[in-house]
Structures are given as structure tokens and as C-alpha cells.
Image: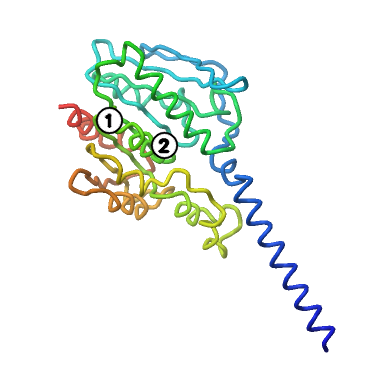
Amino acid sequence: MKKFIKFTKVTVLLLFLVLLGSIFYIRFSRYTDTLIYHVNGLEYESFESNIPHKEYYLEVDTNTVLHGVLFKPKNKPIGTIIHHAGKGMHLMSSQPYYKLLTDRGFQVFGYERRDFGKSTGIADNSLVLKEDALFMFDTILNDTAVQGTAIIIWGQSLGGAFAMMNAAERNDKITGVIVEGTFNSFPDIGKEYARAINMENFKWMMPILMNNDFPAEKEIQKINKPILVIHSNTDEQVPFKLGKKLYKASDTLQSTFWEIQGKHIVGLFDYEEEYIQKFVDFIE
């Protein structure tokens, strides 16, 4: 009996150590970063656009070149929108959004994260992707076509986390920030997607396994410019409650929550006039 008890204790201890080791490996190897940012099967062969534009290929390091494009209106821009796109949104698929905005006088700068579209490198570390986002923002603000214009940061879905970080880090450079269909933190959205990696019964572990390098709930509190949080109450990809939670974390005296209906991040198409007016209001 004593041998059995000893064997059981050793087994339990070994299982605990294996579990602890697995947690440490997933957390500190940034395994979830790769799951979040890597995109397969959405590449395109060459960049083309009917919208007037200027293309950028910016070298970040010896292995990474980031692709960005400044889409321009026909006349002098009334303002500049810096777009942080959702996962899977490259500069070809995003152009229907940009066309609506450039037709109304805005110029829009978008870029593709590492290992996606025409950008090279490896997207396996959110801290590096954060540095990339700020590098692209700082670079485009030094462009003569952008200098002197009102700057609005716009983020959709995953890009909303980048937008909040960008706005918090460069608060003095912007007029305001708009996000749509985004979430309050990676651990919270991780709980929602736990079943996708067969961890539905262990979703409570997601805050332990995931790095939260884009803590939007905290970042939004650092922004002292107008903020608009847009979320569809029928969004099936990012739950409405997470957008609401992000808004409630802000200073609600300077932020606004716009509840819409429809599919994930298609508000610009479903509410075109009202949506674009939100951008206009920020610069007037």
C-alpha cells in the first residue's frame, strides 16, 4: 500500500511538472503569437490599384521589408487615416474600404504585417509587431504628403489592438482614434476561441498561456483624444460584450460607443454615410 501511495504521489508530481513545463513553453516560446498573426493562403501576386497611391517598401532589418501604401483622393486631402487592418486583410482586399474614404477626401495609409501580403519576415512575436506598427506610423508621418494633415487612427478587429497601442504611444500626434469589431484583451478573446484549439474545457488557462502585449483596456485609458468604439451586436467573430468592455474601460466623457448591426467589420458598407461622417467629425 505504501508503495502504491508513493507511486501515486510521484505520478501526480510528474504530471504536474509536465503541465507546468508545457505552460512555460507555450507562454515563453510565444506559441500563441504565431497562431494569432500567421496567415496562410491569402497571398496575391502583384499589387495593383485604381486609386491614386504611393507605394512603400521599408526595410526594418536584414530579413524584413514592410509593404505600405498611401491611397490618395483626387484633390488635396482633408485628413489622413492610418489603418491597422484585421487579420487576413491585405492591401488588395482592403481597397473597397479605402475607395469609399478617398472618394470623400481622405487619404488612407495601410500596411501589411510581417509574413503577409508583400511584407517579408516572420510574424511570431507581438512585441516586434508592435515596433513595426510604430515604425510605419512614424515613417508615414514624415512624408510631405501627410505632414500638416489631421491624423486619425483606425483599427478593425485584430487591428483595433494595434490602433489602441498606436494611439496611446503617439497620443500627441493624432486627432482621434476609431476602432470597429475589436476586443479588450488577448486573454479575453483567447477564451472565446479556446474551442478552436481544442481547449474549450481549459479556457480559464488562456490568460496564463497568452501574452497580453496589446492590453487595449489599459491603452485606451492613456488616450486623451476623442475615441469611437464601433461594434455590431450581431458580430459572430468578436463578441459584442468584448467591444463594450473596451469602451467601459475608457474615459467615457471623451469616448463614444456606436452599436450597429451586421456582420464583422462591414459597418463602413452598411452605414456608409454615417460612418464616414464620424471621421469628418473628428477633424472639424
Residue 172 tag number: 1
**Label 1 crowd bin: few (<14), some (14–19), many (20+), radius 10 Å:** few
Residue 84 percent coordinates (x, y): 40, 32
- Marks 1 and 2, how far apart in space? 17 Å
Q: Residue 148, located in which quarter of the rendered image?
A: top left
Which residue does the image show at 55% across and 30% down from the upper left? 42
Residue 162 tag number: 2
Q: Nearer the viewer, residue 67 or 25?
A: 25
Residue 217 tag number: none
Total labels: the figure holds 2
**Amino acid found under the numbered disc labelled 2:** Phe
Residue 186 percent coordinates (x, y): 47, 49
Q: Nearer the viewer, residue 140 or 192?
A: 140
Q: Is residue 47 above or below residue 283?
A: above
Q: Nearer the viewer, residue 13 or 266?
A: 13
Q: Which type of secondary structure does the marked residue at label 1 adopt?
A: helix
Q: Nearer the viewer, mark 1 or mark 2?
A: 1
Q: Is residue 52 above or below residue 263?
A: above
Q: Residue 134, located in which quarter of the rendered image?
A: top left
Which residue does the image show at 25% across and 33% down from the upper left? 176
Q: Residue furthest bottom?
A: 1
Which residue does the image show at 52% across and 48% down from the upper left? 211
